[in-house]
Image (cartoon, rainbow, N blue to C red):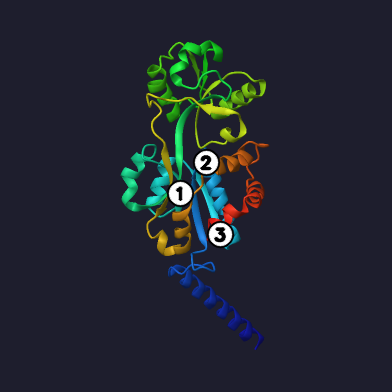
């Protein structure tokens, strides 16, 4: 009798597992209280601080609401390829109409634009706030006041190409030394110069936490060599609105001005170098609770 009983229990357990497997294979998925699917995969561009900040913020918000959020980091090409095939659910860092145009042209019919949450994305040439000039038109004549140097970022960056091909010839800056190394190197030079009260010229972009951390200003670009400001958009996979109807609405209404973004980026990236962002973001949320609560109304 004991053997028969144990055999029956084993059979029932096996049957239960089989039914569970069938249920998971039938497309059924766990949901949160508002009816959205529970599991969510946000893809993040490697090295793009504004996207990391926005993604970590939304992860913190959604985790508290019962979602299970996974952040996966990748470069631009696999991001859009994966989004178009449904391997990812959403990306929060698409720059339009210029920077990511080629990917939207290629995959746009297999994705959904949820709208821009920031309209101030722009390539810049910045100087210390008390620098004696305000325009790129005046830089060549005052090059000696800046050590005859322009401090850049990575040699392969789009900003580096624009500076080399458009800004330098456009404003006659060929006699200045254009030094490229890395974003970290540029920021180190910027920090040192502003701390010492020295003049410095760097290639930069908005939004970036450096605008919150250091006393800097953008040089005017009357010839438009750096291009116009872009919007930072969220893009989802197809049918995202069916699987996440509530979150879809939240992301479509998501707005974050540059000053708010700078403050979040500054505490995340201008600290001790830790990449454990959860406690940092949690503290920032506590200091900006009204804004954060408004994101999910």
Q: Secondary structure at mark 1?
A: strand
Residue 225 horizontal/vertical position (percent): 38, 25
Task: Out of 213 and 26, give the one closest to the viewer.
Answer: 213
Q: Is residue 139 above or below residue 41?
A: above
Which residue has dot 2 on it? Answer: 258
Q: Is residue 12 above or below residue 24?
A: below
Which residue has dot 3 on it? Answer: 68
Q: Is residue 244 above or below residue 55?
A: below
Q: In percent of the image, x 39 and y 33: which residue is there?
A: 228
Residue 89, can we see it? no
**Residue 167 image-quadrant placement:** top left
**Residue 161 image-quadrant placement:** top left
**Classed neighbour count for the residue bearing mark 3: other residues with Cα under 10 Å, few (<14), some (14–19), many (≥20):** some
Residue 224 horizontal/vertical position (percent): 38, 27
Residue 22 horizontal/vertical position (percent): 46, 72
Q: In percent of the image, x 43 and y 70: which residue is there?
A: 26
Mark closer to the chain start, 3 or 2: 3
Which residue has dot 1 on it? Answer: 91
Mark-to-mark CA distance, 3 and 2:
28 Å
**Classed neighbour count for the residue bearing mark 1: other residues with Cα under 10 Å, few (<14), some (14–19), many (≥20):** many
Circle 1 or circle 2, nearest the eye: 2
Mark-to-mark CA distance, 3 and 1:
16 Å
Q: Secondary structure at mark 3?
A: strand
Q: Secondary structure at mark 2?
A: helix
**Classed neighbour count for the residue bearing mark 2: other residues with Cα under 10 Å, few (<14), some (14–19), many (≥20):** many
Mark closer to the chain start, 1 or 2: 1
Circle 3 or circle 1, nearest the eye: 1
Residue 218 horizontal/vertical position (percent): 50, 27
Residue at far bottom of view:
1
């Amino acid at each position: 009798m004991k053997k028969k009983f144990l055999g029956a229990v084993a059979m029932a357990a096996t049957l239960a597992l089989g039914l569970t497997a069938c249920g998971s294979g039938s497309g059924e998925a766990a949901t949160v209280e508002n009816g959205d699917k529970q599991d969510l995969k946000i893809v993040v561009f490697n090295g793009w601080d504004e996207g990391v900040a926005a993604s970590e913020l939304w992860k913190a918000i959604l985790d508290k609401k019962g979602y299970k959020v996974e952040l996966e980091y990748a470069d631009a090409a696999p991001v859009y390829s994966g989004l178009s095939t449904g391997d990812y659910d959403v990306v929060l860092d698409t720059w339009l109409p210029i920077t990511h145009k080629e990917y939207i042209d290629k995959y746009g019919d297999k994705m959904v634009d949820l709208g821009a949450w920031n309209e101030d994305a722009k390539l810049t040439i910045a100087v210390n706030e008390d620098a004696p000039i305000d325009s790129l038109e005046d830089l060549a004549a005052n090059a000696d006041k800046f050590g005859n140097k322009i401090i850049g970022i990575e040699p392969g960056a789009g900003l580096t190409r624009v500076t080399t091909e458009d800004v330098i010839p456009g404003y006659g800056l060929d006699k200045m030394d254009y030094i490229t190394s890395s974003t970290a190197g540029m920021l180190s030079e910027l920090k040192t110069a502003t701390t010492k009260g020295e003049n410095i010229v760097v290639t930069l972009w908005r939004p970036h936490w450096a605008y919150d951390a250091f006393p800097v200003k953008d040089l005017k670009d009357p010839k438009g060599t750096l291009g116009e400001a872009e919007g930072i958009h969220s893009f989802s996979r197809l049918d995202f609105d069916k699987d996440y109807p509530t979150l879809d609405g939240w992301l479509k209404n998501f707005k974050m001005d540059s000053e708010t973004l700078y403050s979040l980026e500054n505490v995340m990236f201008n600290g001790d170098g830790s990449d454990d962002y959860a406690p940092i973001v949690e503290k920032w949320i506590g200091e900006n609770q009204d804004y954060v609560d408004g994101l999910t109304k």
